[in-house]
Image (cartoon, grey):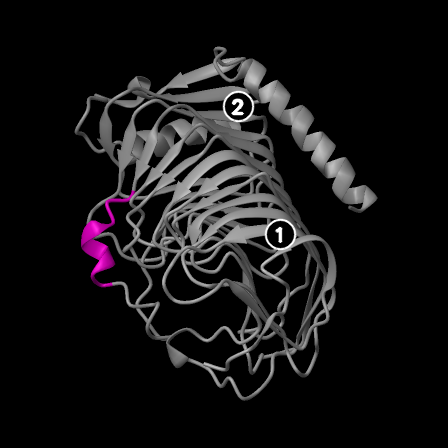
Amino acid sequence: MSTIQSSFLIATILMLLLLDFTVDAQSSADVVFPLKRYGNIVPGTDITKALANAWKDACTSNRSSAIVIPGGIFNVKEGIFKGPCNSPIDFQLGGTLQAPKSLQGNNWITFERIDRLTLSGEGVFDGQGKAAWKKNDCHKRINCAQLPISLRFNFITNSIVKRITSLDSKNFHINVLGCNNLTFHNINITAPENSPNTDGIHIGRSNRIAITMSKIATGDDCISLGDGSKQINITNVTCGPGHGISIGSLGRYTNEEPVEGVIVKNCTIINTTNGVRIKRWPASAASGTATNMQFLDIIMVNVSNPILIDQEYCPWNQCNRKIPSKIKISKVSFKNIRGSCATPVAIKLICSRHLPCDEVKVGDIDLTYNGIKGSITSQCTNVRPIISGKQNPKICSSPYVVP
């Protein structure tokens, strides 16, 4: 672990200790803007305008402020909360905000260009995605109609999101773009396992993002990291159902930025199609790198592909597997990963023949398979892993079978 990663991990732990100490305390904001000040705020009403007015007042305040949303179920057509703001803001959600069932476009709730934001409370962001999932075919074709992401965090700095729930998003639950020093703590994300493209938290082009003490159950990746993700710390997350915790996919677009400095530690992954995964498209649009990624102390429960590097990621045959990936993968560690598999191939390290993986370390692996499809095994190509400790199954024990 690098010095930068160690410092970031220590800083995150200290922040979380402070969070646990203060999370139930009343707001320390100098000014409180209760939503009832902005109209007849009763459950079942549309509070879109009231929220916009409360945000305007809080954002222009020269003293730290809090927006307080009471208990109850409220309708919100769309919420765009932009900065820069003059002082820190605590956005406290006590009730449930419901999206329109027929909402179109790319956004529902957006927080943008804000420093020192706290989004807190025991409240729920309900995307009401059930009707939209039938129309979501982005997992089948490239030029699909976009559905709104429930929560967008664009260019947020030095901020915390804690103890909220995201329910049944139409698309991604949470999207993080261009953020720096943002922590998600004790988050609950829920959608059925058959809900398409409902990634729990997707991160792109962001630095120093922490996800801790959270539960994520979706129809896609619990957590996915896009290009430009740097110094990402994921700890004590329970994932499942879904597609696991993924770095990627990468290599699909031009001008992608490097991925570096990722720690996934002390997580439990249950009944997912993948465990911890690095996925890259073949026939990459441009060259790129992904380096210094660590997967440590992971428990797998009935996971189909517990450990996976896939540089031939090609869902629904939307690419050409015959052209190798141009993304260079290096300095990857899989250590102390244990539990049970749903399929006999417990480990797949499928690297690019154009740029083989370097410095892939695999140690203290103890996975079991009790199914009827054969003995537990692992597959490798274009990689020479550095092996240590227990090996169950034996690393690279079977030849890779091209799909």
The spot of residue 170 in percent (x, y) is: 30, 52
Q: Nearer the viewer, residue 13 or 79?
A: 13
Q: Quadrant of residue 395?
A: bottom right
The answer to whether residue 180 of the structure is visible from this angle is: no
Q: Which mark is residue 61?
A: 2
33 left or right of 19 in image: left
Find the magenta span and give its range: 127-135
Foreground mark, 2 or 1, reads: 1
Magenta highlight on residue 131: yes
| Residue at left offset 20%, top offset 61% | 134
The picture places residue 87, in percent across and down from the top left corner, at 59, 26
Residue 385 in picture, x, y percent from top left: 72, 66
Residue type at numbered disc 1: Ile
Disc count in the image?
2
Instruction: Report the front residue among 210 and 98.
Output: 210
Q: Secondary structure at mark 1?
A: strand
Q: Residue furthest right?
A: 3
- Dot 1: within a 10 Å radius of its alpha carbon, few (fewer than 14), some, or many (20 or more) residues? many
In this rendering, the answer to whether 334 lies above or below 127 is: below
Question: Compared to 159, does 90 lie above or below?
Answer: above
Residue 101 placement, left or right of 185:
left
Which numbered marker is on residue 20? none
The residue wearing badge 1 is: 365
Q: Is residue 301 above or below residue 22?
A: below
